[in-house]
């Protein structure tokens, strides 16, 4: 049975893969981490477009994927329109920062969005933000270096950067001008949610889009008549860099032991 392709610049998309496997336990997945070319977020659109194109073509050629989840906000904002135009026969699901659910959940009307510089500079994000003008105060916080620290399991770097960017995302609280909701607009960030939480009151709400994206993937597959009904939830991990890094990340962030997947 053809797998669903899931890709990110690195290990961040594992946070989405987790939600996808819970929502679609009978589907087979192939996860591709473009580690040799990560991070995407501080490199500009042309680079991200070129890499996204190469990855989709490889996943189609080598695995005959039946659908693609672009588990990367940066690649979605830069390249999803091109991927959809060039692969019109392939259902493609992308991610964007969850501003809509964040504004709906916020009581103070003050929301911060943490994401890569590339995502926050994109026209897609500008349009998303503009659609909430007047209904919420939105602060954008580019988190340079955080993806690199997560990719490298750099605990000291993760801790220092989480503290710094949470300071920029605040002040937090339930007062009328305080931020009560933070959007994690990069798929790497849910992996360090516990660290981020250390710098915020327990009432602070974090929004990420793993679960709604998984639900949207189910709807898209159903409407295309491509839902698996008797699969066994196989998982293959692939990387353009060192696959051992991805395997370690899968063990660390998803609790997947060796044997729970094949890899290359
Ligand atoms: N995980 C990617 C995202 O959601 C980010 C990456 C990067 O900078 O490589 O934006």
Image (cartoon, rainbow, N blue to C red):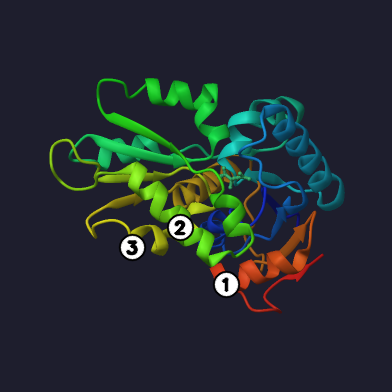
Q: Nearer the viewer, mark 2 or mark 1?
A: 2
143 left or right of 175?
Answer: right
Question: Residue 49's quadrant in the figure?
Answer: top right
Q: Residue at x 63, y 29 (%)?
A: 78
Q: Residue at x 73, y 38 (%)?
A: 52
Above or below, comparing residue 83 to residue 32 in the picture: above
Please give the label number shown on residue 160.
Answer: 2
Please give the label number shown on residue 198.
Answer: 3
* Within-10-Å neighbours for mark 3: few <14, some 14–19, many 20+: few
What is the tally of numbered marks visible in this picture? 3
14 left or right of 114?
Answer: right
Q: Nearer the viewer, mark 2 or mark 3?
A: 2
Could you tell me which quadrant the C terminus lies in?
Answer: bottom right
Q: Residue at x 73, y 27 (%)?
A: 46
Q: In front: 215, or 151? A: 151
Please give the label number shown on residue 252.
Answer: 1
| Alpha-carbon span between mark 2 and mark 3 | 12 Å
Q: In front: 97, or 28? A: 97
183 left or right of 135?
Answer: right
- Which is nearer the N-term, disc 3 or disc 1? 3
Above or below, comparing residue 45 to residue 65 in the picture: above
> Residue 85: where, in percent of width, then height?
71, 24
Q: Residue at x 34, y 43 (%)?
A: 169
**Element class at badge 3:** loop
- Which is nearer the N-term, disc 2 or disc 1? 2
Q: Nearer the viewer, mark 3 or mark 1?
A: 3
Is residue 127 visible from the viewing direction of this image? yes
Please give the label number shown on residue 127.
Answer: none
Ligand 1 is found in the corner quadrant, namely top right
């Amino acid at each position: 049975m053809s797998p669903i392709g899931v890709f990110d610049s690195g290990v961040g998309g594992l946070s989405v893969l987790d939600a996808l496997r819970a929502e679609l336990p009978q589907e087979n997945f192939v996860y591709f981490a473009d580690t040799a070319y990560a991070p995407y977020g501080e490199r500009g659109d042309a680079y991200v477009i070129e890499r996204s194109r190469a990855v989709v073509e490889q996943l189609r050629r080598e695995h005959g994927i039946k659908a693609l989840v672009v588990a990367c906000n940066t690649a979605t904002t830069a390249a999803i329109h091109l991927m959809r135009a060039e692969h019109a026969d392939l259902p493609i699901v992308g991610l964007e920062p969850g501003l809509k659910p964040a504004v709906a959940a916020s009581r103070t009307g003050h929301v911060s969005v943490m994401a890569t510089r590339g995502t926050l500079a994109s026209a897609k994000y500008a349009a998303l933000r503009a659609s909430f003008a007047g209904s919420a105060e939105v602060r954008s916080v580019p988190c340079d270096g955080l993806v690199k620290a997560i990719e490298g399991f750099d605990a000291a770097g993760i801790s220092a950067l989480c503290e710094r960017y949470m300071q920029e995302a605040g002040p937090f609280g339930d007062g009328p001008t305080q931020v009560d909701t933070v959007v994690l607009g990069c798929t790497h960030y849910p992996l360090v949610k516990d660290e981020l939480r250390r710098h915020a009151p327990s009432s602070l709400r974090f929004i990420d889009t793993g679960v709604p994206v998984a639900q949207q993937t189910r709807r898209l597959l159903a409407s295309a008549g491509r839902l698996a009904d008797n699969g066994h939830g196989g998982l293959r991990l692939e990387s353009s860099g060192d696959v051992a890094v991805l395997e370690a990340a899968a063990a660390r962030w998803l609790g997947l032991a060796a044997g729970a997947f094949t890899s290359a």
